[in-house]
Amino acid sequence: MTRAPSATRDRLVDAFAALVVSTGARSATLEAVAARAGVSKGGLLYHFASKDALVDGLLDRFARLAAQDADLMRAAPEGPAEYYVRTSATEPLAASGSAPDQLYTIVIATLRLAQEDDPRATDAFLAANTAWRELIEEQVGDPALARIVQLVGDGLWNSASMGIPVDDLDDILVRVRAMVTAATGA
C-alpha cells in the first residue's frame, strides 16, 4: 500500500507548478520553491532531492489528476465528448476542488515544461491527451470525429485559460451533441 503524499509535499509541488507557470522552469529554483511553499530548503530536500525530483512529483500529480478526470469523463451522464468540451470551456480557476480545477495549473506547468524541451513532460501530456481522446472515440466510434471534438475542447480551454469568455458554450455543446448523435445514432 502506498502512502498518500504529505501536505508539505503537495505544497511543494503546488509551489513548483505555480513558479513554472508564472516565470518558467529555469527560475523555479529549489530556493524559490521552498520560499513560495513556506518551508526551509532542507524541508524541500527531504521530500525532493533535486529539481528533477520536483518535475517527477509534478508529473506524477498530473498523471493522477488526469486519470481522475478520465474517470469523471467515463462516468459523465452527458458522455465523454460533451464532458470534455464543457470542462474545457468553463472557468478553470473555480475553487470547487474537482479534478478539472486542480488539473488546470498542473496542465499549464506540464505544457511549459514540455515547451522547455523536457521529454518527460511531453510524454506525460501525450499519454493524458491520448487517454482523453480514446474515451471520446469509444463514445463516437470515429477517430477523426473524436479528434475534432478534442480540438474544439482544446481551443475553448485556450480561450478560458487566457480569460477570454466562452459566451457561446451552450450553442457549441448543442453542436457537439448533434455530431455525437449523428455518429452514434443515439
Image (cartoon, helix red, strand yellow):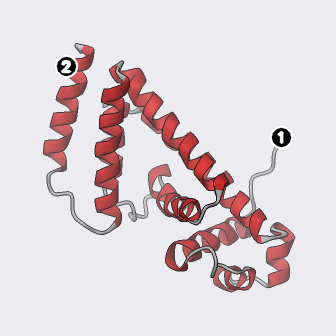
| One can see residue 71 in this view | no
Residue in view at x 73 percent, y 70 percent: 8
Name the residue nearer the viewer: 178 or 40. 178
What's under tag 2, amino acid-wise?
Answer: Ala
- Residues packed near mark 2 inside 10 Å, few (<14), some (14 to 19) or many (20 plus): few
Q: Quadrant of residue 135?
A: top left
Dot 2 corresponds to which residue?
A: 182
At horizontal 84% and vertical 74% (from top left) the residue drawn is: 45
Q: Position of residue 61 (x, y in %)?
A: 64, 54
Count of marks overlaid on the render: 2
In the rendered image, the residue lying farthest to the front is: 117
| Residue 40 versus residue 119 in the image, above or below | below
Q: Evaluate if marks 2 and 1 touch, with contact meaning CB atoms under 8 Å apart.
A: no
x and y, in percent, of residue 70 in the image: 50, 37
**In the rendering, at what x and y percent does residue 88 appear?**
35, 50
Q: Is residue 33 above or below residue 166?
A: below
- Does 87 sit left or right of 164 as displayed? right
Task: Please give left or right for residue 108 compared with residue 77 in the image.
Answer: right
Q: Position of residue 176 (x, y in %)?
A: 22, 34
Residue in view at x 45 percent, y 51 percent:
100
Asked if 159 appears above or below 185 in the picture, the reply is below
Q: Which residue is mark 1?
A: 1
**Which numbered disc flags the more N-terminal residue, 2 or 1?**
1
Q: Nearer the viewer, residue 75 or 112?
A: 112
CA gap between label 2 and label 1 equals 45 Å
Quadrant of image for the N terminus: top right
Q: Regarding mark 2 in the picture, which secondary structure is present there?
A: helix
